[in-house]
Image: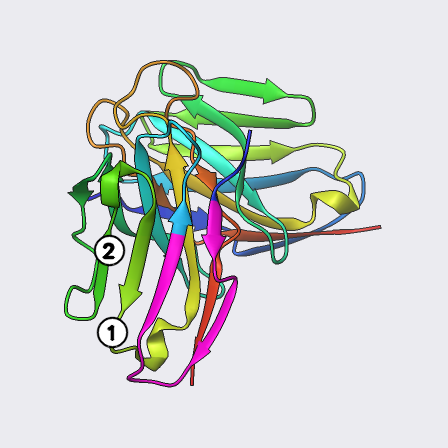
Amino acid sequence: GENVEQHPSTLSVQEGDSAVIKCTYSDSASNYFPWYKQELGKRPQLIIDIRSNVGEKKDQRIAVTLNKTAKHFSLHITETQPEDSAVYFCAASMTGGSYIPTFGRGTSLIVHP
Amino acid sequence: EAGVAQSPRYKIIEKRQSVAFWCNPISGHATLYWYQQILGQGPKLLIQFQNNGVVDDSQLPKDRFSAERLKGVDSTLKIQPAKLEDSAVYLCASSLARTGGAPGANVLTFGAGSRLTVL
């Protein structure tokens, strides 16, 4: 089955800095890569996703890049704000068959004001 | 649009007791997932339903966990007997479709979760 590794487990930045979270996956058949944000005590919510037919996707201050050859994808947050503080999870899955997202272990992002 | 409803939000039991969690997915969502999230870890899939059929339950500890999705809508997850290591948040999620296709079809919407503490 799919295995997703996520790094770092904790990331501490100053407000206004950029933050990068990296994930690798094992199954080359995976073609859909969502990112979820989970604030303390709340449910995970989708913030951005990317499919394997594109290399980069942006949505305001967040962007995701995908390198299919190396089987890794990254989340980039620019101009971080305190409200970005949360746990971020990457996931990988294959949309063509049994769609079962496999999640990484999560990255706790702390943005200091 | 109503979200994914789960209950109870919190449950404290002693080991060897039983517990049941309930989930009502978003209306029209064919696929329903139960995930276990242990503190400090990512969600781990326990079982996936497509309508009222099981798609994947390979990681469900079947000696103590069971789940059903009657009529392809609501679902219940039961643990009997509970162990200390079952302490976790049990997240229910739903999505429109199992297979790929239209954008958004595979987006998971999670419920608020049911936090289980086993003493």
The residue singled out by tag 1 in the image is B80
Which residue is disc 2 drawn over?
B67
- Provide residue A91's location: percent of width, then percent of height: 40, 39
* Mark 2 chain: B
Q: Is residue A41 above or below residue A30?
A: below
Chain of the residue that carries numbered disc 1 in the rendered image: B
Which sits in the foreground, A43 or A63?
A43
Q: How is the image coloured?
A: rainbow
Q: Indicate whether A40 appears above or below B13.
A: above
Residue type, numbered disc 1: Gln
Are the residues tagged 1 and 2 within 8 Å (C-beta)? Answer: no
> Where does the C terminus of chain B fall, quadrant-wise?
bottom left
- Whether residue B109 is visible, yes or no, is yes
Residue A26: x %, y % from top left: 26, 40
Answer with left or right where residue A43 lies relative to residue B94.
Answer: right
| Classed neighbour count for the residue bearing mark 2: other residues with Cα under 10 Å, few (<14), some (14–19), many (≥20) | many
Specify whether residue A104 is in view. no
- Choose top left, top right, bottom left or bottom right for residue A79: top right
- The percent coordinates of residue B114 (x first, y second) are 47, 61
Q: Quadrant of residue B24?
A: top left
| Magenta stretch: includes residue B46 | no
Q: The residue under label 2 is which amino acid type?
A: Ala
Residue found at x 36% / y 20% = A52
How many residues crowd mark 1 within 10 Å: few (<14), some (14–19), many (20+)? some
Q: CA distance from mark 1 to mark 2?
A: 11 Å
